[in-house]
Amino acid sequence: MICQSFLYTRRERRSNRPKYSPKVAIIAPHYGWDNNTEEHVKSLLCQDYEGEYQIYFVTHQINGDGYDISYPHLKRLVEDVNHADVFLASNIIDNNLPRSQKIQNLITVIESLPDDIEVIAFVDADVEIQQDWLSLLVTPLQDPIIGVTVGGRFYSPQNWNFATFVEAIWVNYQLGLQGDHRFAMVWGGSNAFRRELLQNGEILKRWENATIEDLNTTRAVRDLKLKIHFVPDCIAVTRTQNRTWKQVIEFTNRQMIMTCHMGLIAQWLGTFIMFFPKGLLIFGSIPFIYWRQSLLPILFIPFLEIYVYQLVCRNLPKWLRERPNVNDIIRVSKYVAPFSIFLAGINAFYAMFQRRIVWGGVQYEILSATTCKVLGRVKKDN
């Protein structure tokens, strides 16, 4: 599949589509605020897009009359911007709502969209995008067989931290699994679809009681026999640093639990079969190599994973590969690729026995692809 994705990326970059600039609504859900968030907001406000677009930032209330820390920052940044607005969604805990907070935020905006919106695009708050991000996502949607376009995500560690490197490769490796095939998936942090998909795919019905939106969007597009179109030059960058093992394990487990229990069995099973036995073979053999030198060839497997990760990174767009710090990150972090791959296998194994996740300070139990149980807030560690 890595080779297939590599060839697809080369072919896609040679494509030359006519211009297509319908009116777009960009929905950007927010939770929290850090040193990079303001930069990300400003990059959305100045997209190089020939058509008309409106940005809807959305965060949530807290305890009835309060709000997430991002709300006043967003209001300040869009105060004099005609094509941007800020929404405040109901808090799911305070209002006993049966869905995740992110989905509640998205639904709040979608239900208020003007009638003349033709395309809806989504972007996470914690990603850096380029000025042509919107154009890249929207242009392929002129093809009626394409149900949704999706960009990739690239984790860019900002310091030399082993756990941070492991998480980054865990995420970045997925770029090599995207392409024009039936295992392609929608990523909620960067995607777009024609508004008609809301009705044809029963999107809001699928989201109404769900944990996460992108996996349900994936299922909707497949049910309609449409394509999920990966745009290889549309990469969103997340800067990470000083990640703890607890944070990494919680994040990677959450991703795999959702994949397993929301109906994407092929993706979960593929991860389990490819990575879990391989990891056991490699790390389980190391203690016995001194006595059984016939096991030495097993140690070449990690070098193969390192090479595959380098191949995946060659698919990155030119503007990203030319950044000096990105080249340094790839050169150093590639050596932890075997650990990241083994972690993915462990995540897939663990997902068989767990349905509960923690996300945004709230614990959920995934009951099915379209149904979750909100268990309540999680106390922060002191």
Image: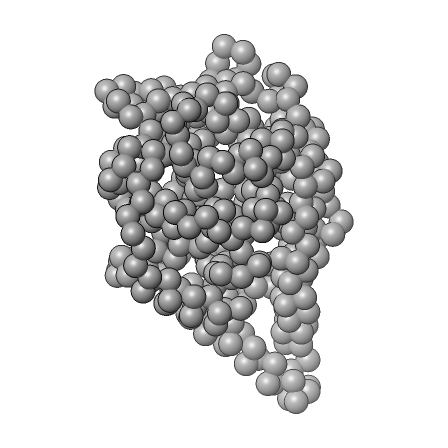
Residue at the top extreme of this rendering: 65
Q: Could you say which is closer to the camera, residue 380 or residue 302? A: 302
The residue lying at 67 percent from left, 45 percent from top is: 262
Q: Residue at x 70, y 31 (%)?
A: 373
Q: Residue farthest to the bottom? A: 294
In the rendering, at what x and y percent does residue 86 appear?
Answer: 38, 22
Task: Place residue 190 in its image quadrant.
Answer: top left
Up the image or down, 294 lies above or below 85; here it is below
Q: Position of residue 139 (x, y in %)?
A: 35, 48
The correct choice, above or below, for 374 with respect to 192 in the image is: above
Estimate the x, y position of residue 257 in percent, counting from the top left: 66, 47
Q: Is residue 62 visible?
A: yes
Residue extending farthest to the right is 353
340 relative position to 120: left or right? right
Q: From the viewer's perspective, is residue 9 above or below residue 126?
A: below
Q: Is residue 144 left or right of residue 340?
A: left
Q: Residue 188 vs residue 95: left or right?
A: left
Of the pair 188 and 378, the residue shown nearer to us: 188
> Does residue 332 appear anywhere in the picture?
no
Q: Residue at x 50, y 66 (%)?
A: 337
- Which residue is rendered at x = 61% and y = 16% of the image? 94
Residue 330: percent from the left, percent from the top? 38, 64
Q: Quadrant of the C terminus?
A: top right
Tally of marks: 0
